[in-house]
Amino acid sequence: MIRSVFLFTCLVISVFHVAYAQTQIPSIDSLQQLYNNNPDSTSYSFNLAQYYRAYAGNLDSLEKYSQITIDLSEKNKDLERRALSAYFLGFVRFQKYADFEGAIQYFLESKAIYQELGDLENVHTKDSALASMYMLMENYEEAGKYFKNSIEVSRKLKDYNTLAVSYSNLGHIHAVLEQYDKMEETYLEGLSYIELDTSVKKQKVELDLLLN
């Protein structure tokens, strides 16, 4: 039960959430034509990868255009699209191949680029992704390390929502390890951040149920 709750809160909310900027679904034909006319552009190859990630659910095409974007980004010095394409490929390694180690390597690559860019929000997202992979591998020590990293970054950003979720996930680890004193302490810490942010107060009921 505890692991099921974790998988819902962490994997669904944190790992595979990628927001698509456009408000209308683009035409795949138009995106493909733009790429065909500009095969050396990371922008157009990335747009195709993003389309297949957001709308089509086509892992083969997602993998293909994400890899093309990474290859092009080495020449074009397009770090942001390289970082997100690496994140996409980590998703593919997990979803298509059940390759946890491969996914971890891509998430680490993505995180390193975002650290170089000073993008703390995306650093946090990659820490959550890494923690999720290690949780699924039942490597709770490594998972805990990345949840703690996420907590530190979220604290810098004053992102109380994420802090509450990260403390909740860390509490799950203590529960799995039967470290019940640490579990309660961690959940209570998460509750303190929920009180600071009305957008996450609805999670208080779930945490209260786990504590009682």
Image: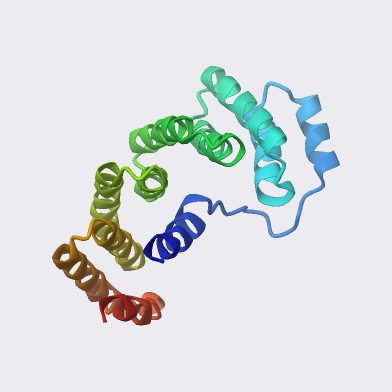
**Above or below 88: residue 125:** below
Question: In the orientation shown, which residue stands out farthest toward the top?
Answer: 75
User: Residue 175 in the image: x percent, y percent?
Assistant: 26, 62
Q: Is residue 142 left or right of residue 7?
A: left
135 or 193, which is in the foreground?
A: 135
Q: Is residue 14 left or right of residue 34?
A: left
Q: Is residue 154 left or right of residue 35?
A: left
79 or 180, which is in the foreground?
A: 180
Q: How many marks?
A: 0
Q: Residue at x 80, y 26 (%)?
A: 36
Q: Is residue 55 left or right of residue 113?
A: right
Q: How is the image coloured?
A: rainbow
**Above or below 204: residue 105:** above
> Which quadrant would the C terminus be assigned to in this image?
bottom left
Q: Residue at x 46, y 36 (%)?
A: 100
User: Residue 15 in the image: x percent, y percent?
Assistant: 47, 50
168 or 163, which is in the foreground?
A: 168
